[in-house]
Amino acid sequence: MQGAYADAQAIFEEVRTLLRESVGPLHPSTLTVANVLAGTLRDKGDLAAARAMFAEVRDARRAVLGEDHPSTLITANEHAGALVRAGDLDEAQAAFEEVIATARARFGDDYPLVIVASSNLGSVLRLRGDAAAACVLLEDAAERATRVLGADNPSTLNAVASHAGLLHELGETPAARSALTDTLARAERVLGIDHPATVTVRRALDTVTAAG
């Protein structure tokens, strides 16, 4: 797997260099490839490089497109996610809060990225031990995702799994098991057994089941 990521990284780096030389570093195509490269670095486990690349693309998109452009917000959300994976929870929380506030101001509460970022923020608060605040965010995100995106959407499945995991931690194991069992069935039917969202839900259900 690492070899595949390394190959992809080399390809995206070459394409990015060619685009920077032909259309310029701030061209939308150049920034799109740079964003994909950042995601590849993240998936490869090179979190320091991924953080730096996501931040570079975010700042460039803010300058070119504006801070509330959908592409800018997507990159800002991904940058915040990389911060979580690196363990920088303080910075990640602030970054998610900024994404939510900016996206909500322009697009409203039911904008998909507001929902996704809210679920992500809830997960950060859960990691930081603020279960009460996390539960409010995760429950709301799961409800909104189901209503707006549909019960079978990968973002909905992740949001429901995150909320159910917290319910388990709070002692509401039957409710968590029920939600995860239903969500896993949906994920396997719609996405397949090997889809990342399916794997996330299955792992959450395994954790709940193992606890009894």
Image: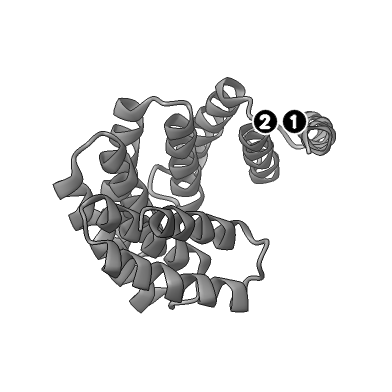
Q: Position of residue 94 (x, y in %)?
A: 28, 33
Mark 1 or mark 2: whose residue is earlier in sequence: 1
Q: Where residue 59 sits: x, y (%)?
A: 48, 31
Q: Is residue 12 above or below residue 195?
A: above
Answer few, some or many: residues within 10 Å of disc 1's Cα (few below 14, many 20 plus, some between 14 and 19): some
The kind of residue on which mark 1 rests is Arg
Residue at left offset 68%, top offset 37%: 40
Give the SS element for disc 1.
helix
* 189 lies above or below 139: below
Q: Are circles 1 and 2 on residues that touch, CB within 8 Å? A: yes
Foreground residue, 59 or 180? Answer: 180
Towards the viewer: 107 or 129: 129
Question: Label 2 amino acid?
Answer: Pro
One can see residue 98 in this view = no
Front residue of 161 and 155: 161
Query: Dot 2: what SS?
Result: loop
Q: Give the quarter of the figure containing the N terminus.
A: top right
Label 2 Cα crowd, 10 Å radius (few <14 / some 14-19 / many 20+): some
Residue under the image location 31 percent in, 58 percent down: 163
Where 29 falls versus 210 (above or below)? Answer: above
Circle on res. 20: 1
Q: Mark 2 — residue?
A: 25
C-alpha distance separating marks 1 and 2: 4 Å
